[in-house]
Image: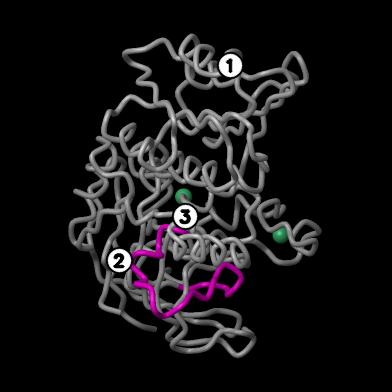
Amino acid sequence: MRRIQAAVLRRKGGPLRIESLEMEGPREDEVLVRIAASGICHTDISYVHDWYAADDGPLVLGHEGAGIVEQVGRKVKGIRRGDHVVLSYESCGRCRPCRRGRPANCLRLYELNFGFRRSDGSNSLQRSGARGHFFGQSSFATHALSTGRNLVKVPRDLPLELLAPLGCGLQTGAGTVMNSLAVPAGASIAVFGTGAVGLAAVMAARIVGAAPIIGVDIIPGRLKLARELGAAHVIDSRREDVESRIREITGGGIDYAVESTGNAKMLRLSMEVLNPKGTVALLTGATGPDRLPGGRKALSVIQSDAVPRQFIPRLISLYRKGLFPFDRLVKFYDFTHINRAIADSRRGFTIKPVLRVSDA
Ligand SMILES: [Zn+2]
Ligand SMILES: [Zn+2]
């Protein structure tokens, strides 16, 4: 048993309160990570404001943790005390998609990431009456338990607090363009919603040589950043007619769309502006109609088909070359200011809040 500090959600809408909890483990198949920093992702905020139900019990959220390995269970291979790591989504490692190297399609993905328990049903925070293991981590805490499968070793010369958000939002946005859609050079793309996920998609679209890249949003500051990060055109959907602007820019429709707003009107538009055989990636859990006219496709993307151990190091190397400047999206907050960080993100003031949890 050890004492940890964790931000606990006890009622819908919050606030989260930092409490002292007892954590059991690590078990022989687990790794204890001292969390240095954690990004706040849209999914965390959805839990606080929309999805939390009283019978969930007190929850510890957070799924973009980064930190230093403190203890390694004897059955975990390839990870050592002192390693710098980024935590990503959890998978079972045993089912057929996992064995074939496609953890994003894990058959147990939902229960392992949203079940707030280990795969055997136990919960390391039981003694304190709270529930952890969110995305195999619960990183809004000074310590997190990982199975090792969702750990990615990262270089020591880059600050952990910068690398934290690579575990979910940025990986999802970039991976959608580079893996799920595999956008080729010269293809046109529109990104609906230029928050953290959408801006990562814009940067990735520039990396693969897509053209033109069009950003659509309602917040002028985010549209300005989209332009700086690679969008040749931006559309303020509150002030301009999105469809006619896209037709004007491309002389027709677009080849690829990334829908990250979850807004019903944008969802419909993202399909309507597609060229025949065009594809839209839906990132908010929405599913499109099975069949769209003209050979158009709608993909419901989960974790962007990325294998974190391969994709996160790739994003880090693109960052080093100046091609994936995700540091421009990040704003740091002290752990104790977690509620302000969430509020700033909801209002669109901050694109990617990152909590400084402990010195590392
Ligand atoms: Zn699996
Ligand atoms: Zn996330």
Q: Position of residue 288 (x, y in %)?
A: 64, 24
Q: Where is residue 223 in the image (x, y as percent from the top left)?
A: 34, 31
- Circle 2 is placed at which residue position? 6
- Circle 3 is placed at which residue position? 323
Q: Nearer the viewer, residue 168 or 135?
A: 168
Q: How many residues crowd around disc 2 within 10 Å: few (fewer than 14), some, or many (20 or more)? A: many
The kind of secondary structure element at disc 3 is loop
Q: Nearer the viewer, residue 188 or 338?
A: 188
Identify the residue at image location x=35%, y=62%: 38
Q: Which amino acid does label 1 sit on?
A: Val
The kind of secondary structure element at disc 1 is loop
Point out the stretch of residues depicted in magenta.
145-166
Position of residue 321 relative to residue 358, above or below, is above
- Circle 1 is placed at which residue position? 273
Work out whether residue 162 can be spotted. Answer: yes
Q: Position of residue 151 (x, y in %)?
A: 54, 71
